[in-house]
Amino acid sequence: MKTLIVYNPKSGKGKFKNYIDRLIMALKEMNINEVSVFSSDRPKEITDFLLLNAYKFEIMILSGGDGTLNETVNALMKVRKKPKILYIPSGTVNDVGRMLRLSKDPLIAIELLKEKPVKMDVVQINNNYFI
């Protein structure tokens, strides 16, 4: 299963990058062996990357704040083949993560990959999307 880890290194206190190697090892234990990592260094970089590459992945593990999640949703709504998203909140506010009661601990959060995915509504206003 091709998996993409996308994260915003500036989100929150920037701690997520310290989990990447352990996450990859935990994913291998779940028989997820094809893992790519993408770090966003500037606004809209995730958008640019996903518009060109989202179709290559079945699962996307996304870590960042509400803005990172919003940018990702807006990019994915513009592509035909969308990966399933596992969102790991790592921002300072994390409204969506708090609302969904998502763990901020990446090693706990990836356990959700063992569960059945749930669908979430995406709302469009003009050319912008949000959840």
Image (cartoon, rainbow, N blue to C red):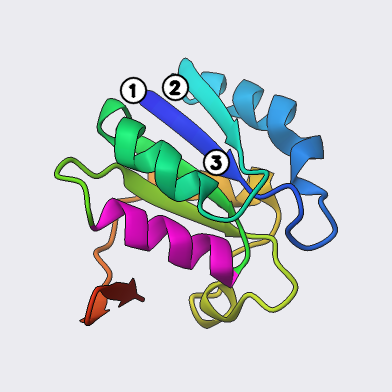
Locate residue 16, reporting x and y percent: 75, 46
Q: Residue furthest top?
A: 33
**Mark 1: which secondary structure?**
loop
Q: Earlier in the sequence, mark 3 or mark 1?
A: 1
> In the rendering, at what x and y percent does residue 44 appear?
51, 53
Query: Main SS of the magenta segment?
Result: helix
Where 34 falls versus 22 (above or below)?
above
- Mark 2: amino acid: Ile
**Residue 1 tag number:** 1
The quadrant of the picture occupied by the N terminus is: top left
Q: Which residues are magenta?
A: 66-77
In contact (CB < 8 Å): disc 3 and disc 2: no
Q: Earlier in the sequence, mark 3 or mark 2?
A: 3
Q: CA distance from mark 3 to mark 2?
A: 16 Å
For the residues bearing labels 2 and 1, Cβ distance under 8 angstroms: yes
Specify the quadrant of the image occupied by residue 97: bottom right
Indicate which disc residue 32 carries. 2
CA distance separating discs 3 and 1: 16 Å
Q: Which mark is residue 84?
A: none
Callout 3, which amino acid? Val
Q: Is residue 72 magenta?
A: yes
Which quarter of the figure is the C terminus placed in? bottom left
